[in-house]
Every structure is written in structure tokens, then in C-alpha cells.
Image: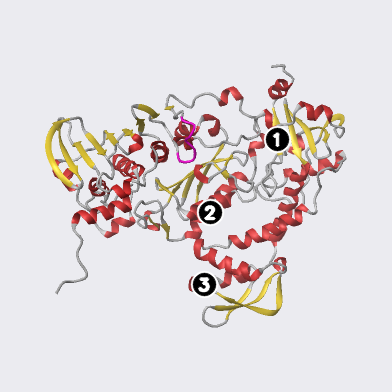
């Protein structure tokens, strides 16, 4: 009797596995580049033709392979990286699944050249569609060359889904960029159609590599963050000031133990670190490295190894978010003199970064390496034009005077504020259009948005006062019954104590139902039932209550916005002094809670250029 269930042939298994590992040419580049890095290579050359559709060749000077290891590398689940199941939780290499070579070889014409000695005698294996066609000896230096031609030649249906050449090149360049960023001590070059696209020399550290990839001007606007927790979490990052943003999250680079990941918990933590500092739809530039005990993170949850699972998600999330907030809190870049424009244009190093000239390359092209840069208040066209200044009737120009720093403490003084007041030390020139305060800082002209400044002051005071005491609750006259799905109900049940501390009173009501009996007083007029469900879903996702905190912050922002100095409001000198004093005593003073900048700066050179003096 013929069975309905059959064991699939080996070649079909390999093609199925290839479908998980090899999505497009960039997938091949990623796997081969990771193998080269794991081999200890210090020089790697990636060569592509037709965006990788016609040829992908990766050459390295790593340890190489013996003849027997070269054969074994084409077997499924054959790897030198792990021996036992315990090794899966102590991984220190990029690759470990043992699927890459077998999967790639099953859907291409692959030639492997490798040598594991200094005698110059290596081996060459040619594989076509997963079948070994020839094996020969050859002379070559120690290292490995993997040449992949005609990707998906035997899977025409898959080949039809490949995009145009420049798009595939963009994806491949993005992979190389991420690996190069995490491995600054390795020289990495990328060629396309015999044209050098990336030529990155070996660097001393991440800063030099970031400068080579993203540009020296971007590096000058990045803040260094170094943090270590009591739980042995180590964070090293370069993060942008709030004025330096992108229109997409494509320039948030996150690495766990040297491995690039695209994890939603980490991404959420990064954005949480910038909460109330960025305008809606804008994203920071972040290069973040997190070192964690390999036993505390599972990198074996996705074939491409882009996603991970943390044993304690909330611990990792809060450590990242708080580390970024601590670096951004003082807004120390306000007091730093701007980098001279000529200095900003100096090349990062001898490393060369060349981008294609094709204008059609957008988000998924090599141009993504540089992205759309929103300048941090250095461009003249973002400043007041001379016509605006000369034609304004609202510009009150009094005798300039310098305010004195107040050494007294304010009752709302918050931790983390700067010892010396930047704003109190500004020389006040006057008020423009009853909306902007004009000041002088050395030779620079400083403009301050009075509404944005006071809005941040009011918000920080409200938030600080709110955090200092217990959250008042309001008992509902009629409890509201919440019907949840299994996952949300489980998350809600597991975190009842945390929710009670936040002002909610919730009791099980049988099955997956809960009775909502009391809510935070600030949320009485909100759709709290929906909020509780959203909180439960977030607790399930990242194990914290950011949704509730964001909802409360939204209310505090609204209160601050309606209770502070407005635009088109004349201010006396004493009021400006008081506002500046308050700004010096709060955190995150560079932006209003909506993310708009509080301060803009113009150098003397920029002002002189307005009047054609330079």
C-alpha cells in the first residue's frame, strides 16, 4: 500500500533550506562574509556582478580549510562552530547552523578554493545545483575564495522575484556596511562590475569605521555612550543629538555580542531613549553594541539570525533606554562650540567610500549608506533670512546685558542637570516677533523658541512631581469587564502587582475576563479599557509598561502646553531670566516634549555670509 507521507529527496531538502537562508544575493554575501570573519580573516574582498545575480565572489586571508573539511562544508548541518547543545548558549561566532554552504550550492554554480597551510597547496571543489562536479588541487595562499555564479539558475520561479541590479546591489552594500561597522579591525572592500564601491582599511576602533561609512560630519554630531549594569550588561554606542535625524529607522544599527540584529525589543528601547526628543516620523542615527552573557540570549530563533530572544527582555530593554536617556539628559552639546564647516568636510581617513552615480537608487540602494541627513541647525537656509530680520516690527532691541547665574536651588531641581547654567550665561539681545529670544554666546547668535522652552520646563516639572509621589486612583462607580485573548490575559494576570502600583485595580472575573475597578486619576476621562488591553499586549511583547507611561506623558504634555508662555507674548527681562534659570535646572532642555528644537545657533561666519561679507 502506497503511503501518503514520503521522505523528501536530499536535493529538494536543500532547496527548501535554501529558501530559508538564501532570499537574494545579499543573503549569500551575508553568509559568506560571516564565514570569512569567523575564519579570522583580516582582509576581505567582495566582488559582485549584476548586483550579485551573475557573480558573488568573496576572498579572504583566514585560516582556510583542509581537503576533508572542504568536502564536509557542503553537508547539511555540518559546522566547526558547535559540538553539543550546550554550545548553542555559549556562541561566540557569527555562523553556526551549518546550512549556508549546502544551501547556497544547491541553488547556484559554486566554486570553492581553500588552503589551510603556508605551503601554498590548496584544493578546489566545483558544485553545480548541489552536486559535486569536480575536485582538483591548486596553488594559492592561505585563505578561502568562494565564487557563486548564476544564483537560482535551477529555480526560475525564485529568480523572477529578484529585483533590478541596483536594488540588489543596495541590499548587498547594506549587509557589508553592517558587518564592516562591527569589525573595524578588518579591511573590507566591495567591488561591483569592477568598480570599487567600498574600500575600508583596518581601523583602531568603531569611531573611525563609523566616520568612514557615515561621514565625518555625522560622527561629529554623535555622542559616545559607555554603560555597564550590575547584571554584567555592557553597552557601547554612538548616538545622534536630537537635531540629527533620518526619515526612516534604517540608520539604527544594533549589535548583540558583535552580531547585527533587527530586534523589535532593542529597537523599541532605542526609541524609548529618545522619547519626547524627536518629532513624529523622525528617527535617530544610532550605532549600538550590547555585550551580554550568551546564555542570556537565544540567537537561534530565525534562519537568518537577525532576530534574537532575551531571557529577561525587560531588563535589557530598560538598560538600553536608560543608558541613552542618561546621555541625552544634560543636553551637553548646547554648550559645545559648533564644529567649523571646513573641518566637517574633511575626509574621515584614507578609507574610501564611493557611491554609484545613478539617481534612481533610493531606500534599497547603496545611497542608503548615507541616507537623508537632517542637519543640526548649521544650514543658513534654516535660519532667519535677513529680510525677516530687517522687516520685522516686533523686534525689541534693548541695551544688551548679561544675566547672572543663580546659585540658589529651585524646588523642582532635577537630577542630572549641568552644574553651570548655559542659558543663564547667555547675553540677551532682545525678543523677535514676541516669539523668539535672541542671545549671544561668544561670537555666535543663539535663537530660543520661548514657547518650546517653557513647554519643556513645564513638562519636566509636572513629570518630576508626578514621579515623586504615589499615583492617585479613582474608583469606578461601575466596574468595567475586560474580555481578553489568552496571551493578553496571561500577561495581565502575571503583572497585576505592577498595574496596581500604577493606579489600576483589576480583579480576575473568570476565564480570560477581568474586572477593572479603579484607574489612575489622570486617566479618568480616557478610554481606559482600551488602554489596559494595550498595556497587556505591551507587557506580553516587551515586559514593561511603556504604553501607560506614554499615555500619562501625553496628558502631562497637554497640561504643560496649555499652561506655559505662548508665542506672540512679550516678555520682560526678568521673565526671560527666570525662564533661562528654569531651563538650566531641567533635563532634556534642547527640545520641547514634541521634539521641536528649543535652540538654534548661527555662527558669525554664517551671519557674515548673509550680508555677503564672506
Establish if 190 lies above or below 88: above
SS majority, magenta = loop
Residue identifier under label 2: 268
Q: Residue at x 71, y 55 (%)?
A: 557
Q: Which residues are magenta?
A: 358-364
Q: Position of 145 compared to 490: left or right?
A: left
How many marks the image carries: the answer is: 3
| Quarter of the image where the N terminus is located | bottom left
Task: Tell me the CA gap for discs 3 and 1.
Answer: 47 Å
Mark 1 surroundings within 10 Å by alpha-carbon count, few (fewer than 14), some (14 through 19), many (20 or more)? some
Among numbered discs 3 and 1, the one appearing first in the sequence: 3
Q: Position of residue 15 (x, y in %)?
A: 25, 53
Mark 3 surroundings within 10 Å by alpha-carbon count, few (fewer than 14), some (14 through 19), many (20 or more)? some
Q: Position of residue 294 (x, y in %)?
A: 37, 54
Q: Residue at x 63, y 37 (%)?
A: 333
Residue identifier under label 3: 494
Task: Tell me the CA gap for discs 3 and 2.
Answer: 22 Å
Among numbered discs 3 and 2, the one appearing first in the sequence: 2
Disc 1 secondary structure class: strand
Q: Is residue 362 magenta?
A: yes
> In front: 377, or 151?
151
Q: Position of 189 compared to 279: left or right?
A: left
Disc 2 secondary structure class: helix
> In front: 228, or 476?
476
> In front: 175, or 142?
175
Q: Is residue 146 magenta?
A: no
Res 84 → quadrant? bottom left
Disc 3 secondary structure class: helix
Foreground mark, 3 or 2, reads 2
Residue identifier under label 1: 600
Amino acid at each position: 500500500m502506497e503511503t501518503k507521507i514520503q521522505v523528501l529527496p536530499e536535493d529538494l531538502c536543500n532547496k527548501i533550506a535554501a529558501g530559508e537562508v538564501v532570499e537574494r544575493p545579499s543573503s549569500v554575501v551575508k553568509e559568506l562574509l560571516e564565514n570569512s570573519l569567523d575564519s579570522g580573516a583580516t582582509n576581505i574582498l567582495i566582488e559582485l556582478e549584476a548586483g550579485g545575480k551573475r557573480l558573488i565572489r568573496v576572498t579572504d586571508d583566514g585560516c582556510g580549510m583542509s581537503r576533508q573539511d572542504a568536502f564536509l562544508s557542503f553537508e547539511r548541518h555540518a559546522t566547526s562552530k558547535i559540538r553539543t547543545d550546550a554550545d548553542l548558549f555559549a556562541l561566540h561566532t557569527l555562523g553556526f547552523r551549518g546550512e549556508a554552504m549546502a544551501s547556497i550550492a544547491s541553488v547556484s554554480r559554486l566554486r570553492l578554493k581553500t588552503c589551510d597551510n603556508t605551503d601554498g597547496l590548496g584544493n578546489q571543489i566545483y558544485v553545480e545545483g548541489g552536486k559535486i562536479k569536480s575536485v582538483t588541487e591548486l596553488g594559492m595562499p592561505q585563505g578561502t575564495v568562494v565564487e557563486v555564479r548564476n544564483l537560482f539558475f535551477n529555480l526560475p520561479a525564485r529568480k523572477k522575484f529578484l529585483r533590478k541590479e541596483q536594488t540588489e546591489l543596495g541590499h548587498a552594500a547594506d549587509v557589508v556596511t553592517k558587518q564592516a561597522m562591527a569589525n573595524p579591525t578588518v579591511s573590507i572592500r566591495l567591488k561591483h562590475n569592477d568598480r570599487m564601491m567600498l574600500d575600508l582599511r583596518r581601523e583602531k576602533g568603531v569611531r573611525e569605521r563609523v566616520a568612514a561609512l557615515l561621514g565625518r560630519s555625522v560622527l561629529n554630531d554623535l555622542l559616545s555612550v559607555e554603560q555597564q549594569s550590575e547584571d554584567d550588561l555592557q553597552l557601547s554606542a554612538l548616538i545622534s543629538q536630537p537635531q540629527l535625524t533620518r526619515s526612516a529607522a534604517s540608520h539604527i544599527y544594533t549589535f548583540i555580542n558583535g552580531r547585527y540584529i533587527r530586534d523589535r525589543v532593542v529597537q523599541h528601547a532605542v526609541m524609548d531613549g529618545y522619547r519626547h526628543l524627536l518629532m513624529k516620523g523622525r528617527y535617530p542615527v544610532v550605532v549600538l553594541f550590547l555585550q551580554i552573557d550568551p546564555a542570556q540570549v537565544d540567537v537561534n530563533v530565525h534562519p537568518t539570525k537577525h532576530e534574537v530572544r532575551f531571557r529577561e527582555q525587560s531588563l535589557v530593554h530598560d538598560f538600553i533606554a536608560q543608558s541613552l536617556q542618561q546621555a541625552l539628559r544634560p543636553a551637553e552639546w548646547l554648550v559645545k562650540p559648533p564644529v567649523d564647516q571646513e573641518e566637517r568636510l574633511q575626509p574621515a581617513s584614507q578609507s574610501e567610500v564611493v557611491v554609484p552615480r545613478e539617481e534612481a537608487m533610493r531606500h534599497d540602494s547603496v545611497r542608503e549608506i548615507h541616507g537623508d541627513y537632517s542637519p543640526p541647525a548649521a544650514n543658513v537656509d534654516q535660519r532667519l533670512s535677513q529680510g525677516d530680520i530687517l522687516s520685522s516690527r516686533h523686534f525689541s532691541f534693548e541695551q544688551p546685558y548679561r544675566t547672572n547665574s543663580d546659585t540658589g536651588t529651585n524646588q523642582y531641581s532635577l537630577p542630572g542637570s549641568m552644574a553651570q547654567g548655559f542659558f543663564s550665561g547667555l547675553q540677551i539681545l532682545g525678543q523677535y516677533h514676541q516669539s523668539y529670544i535672541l542671545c549671544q554666546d561668544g561670537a555666535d547668535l543663539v535663537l530660543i523658541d520661548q514657547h518650546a522652552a517653557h513647554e519643556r520646563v513645564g513638562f519636566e516639572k509636572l513629570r518630576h512631581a508626578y514621579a515623586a509621589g504615589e499615583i492617585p486612583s479613582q474608583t469606578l462607580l461601575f466596574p468595567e469587564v475586560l474580555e481578553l485573548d489568552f496571551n493578553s490575559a496571561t500577561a495581565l494576570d502575571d503583572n497585576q502587582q505592577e498595574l496596581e502600583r500604577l493606579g489600576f485595580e483589576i480583579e480576575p472575573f473568570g476565564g480570560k475576563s477581568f474586572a477593572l475597578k479603579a484607574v489612575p486619576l489622570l486617566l479618568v476621562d480616557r478610554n481606559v479599557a482600551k488602554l489596559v488591553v494595550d498595556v497587556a499586549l505591551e507587557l506580553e511583547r516587551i515586559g514593561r509598561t511603556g504604553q501607560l507611561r506614554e499615555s500619562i506623558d501625553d496628558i502631562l504634555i497637554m497640561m504643560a502646553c496649555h499652561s506655559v508662555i505662548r508665542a506672540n507674548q512679550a516678555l520682560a527681562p526678568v521673565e526671560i531670566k527666570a525662564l533661562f534659570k528654569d531651563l538650566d535646572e531641567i533635563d532634556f532642555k534642547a527640545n520641547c516634549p514634541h521634539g521641536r528644537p528649543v535652540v538654534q545657533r548661527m555662527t558669525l561666519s554664517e551671519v557674515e555670509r548673509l550680508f555677503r561679507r564672506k
